[in-house]
Amino acid sequence: GLTKHFPIRKRGRELLSRGTRGVHAVDDVDLVLRRGRVTALVGESGSGKSTVARLLAQLHPQTSGTLRLGGEEVVVKRGRAFRAYSKRVQMIFQDPFASLNPVHTVRYHLTRALKIHGRAGKTAQDLEQALTDLLTRVQLSPPERYLDKFPHELSGGQRQRVAIARALGADPEVLLADEPVSMLDVSIRLGVLNLLRDLKDRLLLAILYITHDIASARYFADETFVMYAGRVVEGGDSETVTQHPAHPYTQLLIDSAPDPDRPAAEDKDGGSGEPPSLIDPPRGCRFNPRCPFAMDICRTEVPPPFPLDDGPGHFAACWLYGEGAAG
Ligand code: SF4
Ligand code: MG
């Protein structure tokens, strides 16, 4: 039930239009992440997928809904309690250049992460060993070649590996990866995704993989959830969702997915037409203005997730699959 509405401010005052509660960035999202599994959250820009990650990282408090970690409810945390939470739930971002401080070396970034999370050990040798282990984990070897480099001396892929190593410095259970490869050269994306998959298996991480590239979700994620305009519209095991998409929006995303044989410059963010305003989203199914199958009920009632029987956990929030619907 995770929900986030941002107030709209104009000249410092909250500006709310017609009874709305601001920008409906995320509405009533249910997700379960499991250790040793990759869960993909797929959608175009502005679908709310990054906001979901930021809510899970508790970088924003949610407007409503409940977040649980290992069965225990997470309450909004700041200060020391926030640090204890972030030790367990780490995040990596799209642009590794922006997330690493250009005036500091790899050694500085990793040492700081280890110290913050109490994992630097007691002696200088302990620290050196921990640094070596982190760089080895992300396949930057030999470690001494990288430790004293600055971010600008590394390639994009190496920088993202350093950002991953820094996150691993906390020894987390959950890794939230927001478009972790979309700014990297196509040729090195697979290597970074394979590294994440390997880490997930070896460290039993629960990974949330946020992407606009549904084809990569099929390859990389165990389960895939599709977001549209702040809501999850379809989910299930990745094979089923990507091979037998049920929701008209998922079908559109797959039809407009980049062809691997086309140059990357032609990659689109997915879908034709414009996503709706989240300040005053369409009533009923938010996809109804773009949907070729829209019916009357779609313009008034929000479709709940209807279970489908063609794959594990498969569901679609679409009236085409409602009780009494044809087919
Ligand atoms: Fe289309 Fe209606 Fe399904 Fe929404 S609920 S995707 S408008 S058919
Ligand atoms: Mg984003």
Image (cartoon, rainbow, N blue to C red):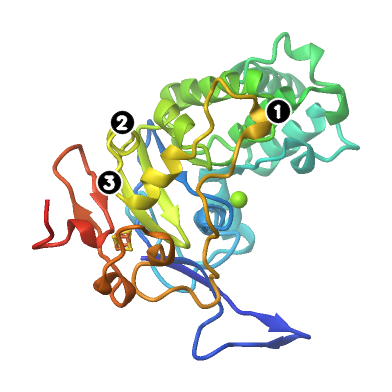
Closer to the chain start, of discs 2 and 3, is: 2
Q: Residue at x 56, y 79 (%)?
A: 22
Q: Which mark is residue 246?
A: 3
Q: Quadrant of the N terminus?
A: bottom left
Whether tag 2 and tag 3 are in contact, CB under 8 A, the answer is no
Disc 1 marks a residue whose amino acid type is Val
Disc 2 marks a residue whose amino acid type is Glu
Whether tag 2 and tag 1 are in contact, CB under 8 A, the answer is no
Furthest residue toward left:
324
Q: CA distance from mark 3 to mark 1?
A: 38 Å
In-front residue for pair 219/69: 219
Residue 142 locus on image (x, y percent) = 73, 8
Q: Is residue 28 left or right of residue 325?
A: right
Residue 247 locus on image (x, y percent) = 31, 50
Position above or below: 276 against 49: below
* Residue 122 appears in the figure: no
Q: Residue at x 8, y 62 (%)?
A: 324
Is label 3's Cβ within 8 Å of ligand 1? no
Say which residue label 2 marks.
239
Residue 162 locus on image (x, y percent) = 70, 28
Closer to the chain start, of discs 3 and 1, is: 1
Q: Secondary structure at mark 3?
A: loop
Q: Secondary structure at mark 1?
A: helix
Q: Residue at x 87, y 23 (%)?
A: 153
Residue 165's quadrant in the figure? top right
Disc 3 marks a residue whose amino acid type is Ala
In-front residue for pair 198/144: 198
